[in-house]
Amino acid sequence: MRHCIYPGTFDPFTNGHLDVLLRAAKLFDRVTVAVALSSTKEPLFTAEQRVALIKATVGRMPNVDVVAFDGLLVEFAHKQKAHAIIRGLRALSDFEFEFNMALMNRHLEPQVETIFVMPNESYSYTSSTLVKQIARLGGDVTKFVPAPVAEALRQVFKHPTPRQTRAGKQSGWHRRA
Ligand code: COA
């Protein structure tokens, strides 16, 4: 059974990520979406929230599972007995970073191959940072992210009503402390 890891910070998961995942799920018998804790990126959503949002998006895709991981990606891939790491290449600008990462990962673990797939060109300008920026400023992100993610962003960036503030109410997708 061919198994690949699709790693990322996914803060949050976008339609571009989903496009890559759907392609990987056609190529491999099993895909594990691996959500990096990525403390250096200071994510908006906790790892648990990011995992939950991806699970809510992929629903019951039979050959996909979603887990959080910490530490070296290649060690995680090795433990999972994965054959490959999948990464998306949106544009030439992604290439240098991805190339370095793939070669370093190969150096660390020669058994795990990195495979690049290209998402549909309509996602070439989508990024998690831009999506968060648009949502923070009240813009519409529904074209760029799956519905559960759009709703979570709406909850995070909504301005609380005076009543909610008084009651100290928080939604399930409140900002991390
Ligand atoms: N569609 C839309 N956006 C995409 C995309 C796609 N198909 N592919 C990448 N992106 C964007 C993301 O939105 C994100 O944008 P942002 O920087 O504005 O947030 C950016 O490209 C990359 O994010 P993502 O795909 O989530 O991956 P990442 O680069 O954050 O993930 C890890 C990097 C987690 C794979 C890497 O840091 C890692 O392996 N960490 C573990 C530690 C380790 O092993 N380090 C040694 C590595 S050699």
Image: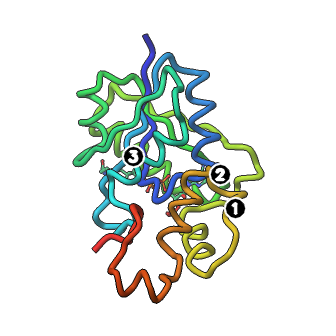
Horizontal side of residue 51 vs 139, given as left or right? left
Please tell me how crowded label 3 is: few (under 14), some (14-19), or many (20+) other residues with Cα within 10 Å.
many
Asked if the residue at tag 3 contacts the one at tag 2, i.e. Cβ–Cβ closer than 8 Å, the answer is no
Mark 1 or 3 closer to N-term? 3
Residue in the picture at 29% in, 33% down: 109
Asked if the residue at tag 1 contacts the one at tag 2, i.e. Cβ–Cβ closer than 8 Å, the answer is yes
In the image, which disc is placed on residue 90? 2
Q: Report which residue position mark 1 lands on.
A: 125
Helix, strand or loop under label 2: loop
Viewer-proximal residue among 43 and 110: 43
Please tell me how crowded label 2 is: few (under 14), some (14-19), or many (20+) other residues with Cα within 10 Å.
many
As drawn, 27 above or below 75: above
Q: CA distance from mark 2 to mark 1?
A: 8 Å
Residue 67 location in percent, x, y? 34, 38
Residue 104 location in percent, x, y? 35, 46
Helix, strand or loop under label 3: helix
Foreground tag (1 vs 3)? 3
Q: CA distance from mark 1 to mark 3?
A: 23 Å
Of all residues, the one furthest to the top in this rendering is: 1
Residue 58 location in percent, x, y? 54, 36
**Residue type of the residue flagged with mark 2:** Arg
Of all residues, the one furthest to the right in this rendering is: 122
Mark 2 or 3 closer to N-term? 3
